[in-house]
Image (cartoon, rainbow, N blue to C red):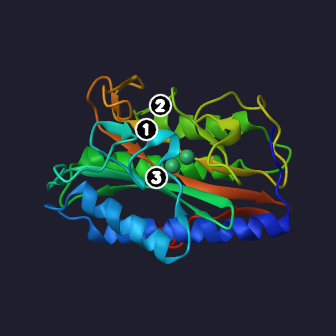
Amino acid sequence: MITLKNAAQITAMRDAGRITGEALLIARDMIQPGISTYEIDQAIRKHIEKCGATPAFLGYHGFPASACISINDEVIHGIPAKNRILKDGDIVKIDTGAIYRGYVGDSARTIPVGNVSDEAKKLIQVTRDSFWAGVEKLEAGNRLGDVGSAIDTLVRQNGFSTVKRYVGHGIGTNLHEAPDVPNFGTPGRGIRLSAGMTLAIEPMVNAGKADVIELNDGWTVKTADRSLSAHYENTVALTSNGVLILTEVEKGF
Ligand code: MG
Ligand code: MG
């Protein structure tokens, strides 16, 4: 069941979104060759807790950290660790969430470490652009297929592939709510959009093929062909006055 949120609920979600977005800025500013993904996770947790919020991922289905941190060909759900050290040329995906006064924010960014390849730069840019292409279709009366199709079309035009196995989702008092929000689709098909929907839109884009594999740790998802992957996610609200990007605290990031 899709839970529509009223204006007061969306205002509450803004706080959770802001805290989540700030945690990602802190992570971005720490990222450099030599730092461990554990250190980044700890800084994210510290910020969320300092704000009086709770890390949404910590303990979620048993996940052991406050952020999923995934490097290069890892797509999503990477587990932070002291022995996972970032190096020059890596791309790193940070995905985190905060629960504040009962509402959840969920957001992810892909960040280059030092000097990265032209392909990596393009992949990060196209993934971010595909999110915004999807958001352009986010209006009452449109359908989810319009959003997914816009994302996937831009990705394919750039020679990359959208991950199909994992999708975005509704969000509110739960991290994952109905509906599923695929990053692909057919225009004019799928659930009709209406004011009060709050969604986590999150294209996952592979430089190679769309196929992914899950590792034996029970969490980490990688590209099957070992190509690079990027991820960009915001929690958004569709209101009668347009779209709010709840987890965006710095334009252009
Ligand atoms: Mg996320
Ligand atoms: Mg999400």
Left or right of 90, for residue 236: right
| Rendered image: mark on residue 112 | none
- Relative to 163, residue 239 above or below: below
The x, y position of residue 57, in whole percent, is 49, 51
Q: Are marks 1 and 2 in contact (CB under 8 Å)?
A: yes
Answer yes or no: is residue 41 visible. Answer: yes
Among numbered discs 1 and 3, the one appearing first in the sequence: 3
Residue 150 sits above or below residue 46 on the image: above
Task: Write down the residue under mark 2.
Answer: 163
Q: Is residue 143 above or below residue 65?
A: above
Q: Nearer the viewer, mark 1 or mark 3?
A: 3
Q: Residue 10: give x, y in percent of width and height.
A: 76, 65
* Amino acid marked by disc 2: Val
Which is more N-terminal, label 2 or label 3? 3
Does dot 2 land on a helix, a strand or a loop?
A: loop
Quickly name the residue at label 3. 58
Amino acid on which the number 3 mark rests in the picture: Leu
Q: Is residue 125 left or right of residue 118?
A: right
Tell me the element at label 3.
loop
For ligand 1, tell me if the residue under mark 1 lies within 8 Å.
no
The three-letter code of the residue at mark 1 reads Val
Residue at x-position 28% and y-position 36%: 73
> Residue under circle 1?
205
Cα–Cα span, label 1 and label 2: 6 Å
Label 1, label 3: how many angstroms apart (C-alpha)?
Answer: 25 Å
The quadrant of the rendering that contains the N terminus is top right
Where the C terminus falls, by quadrant? bottom left
Residue displayed at 63% across by 36% down: 148
Q: Are marks 3 and 2 in contact (CB under 8 Å)?
A: no
Mark 3 crowd level (few <14, some 14–19, many ≥20, 10 Å Cα) = some
Q: Residue at x 78, y 38 (%)?
A: 143
Mark closer to the chain start, 1 or 2:
2
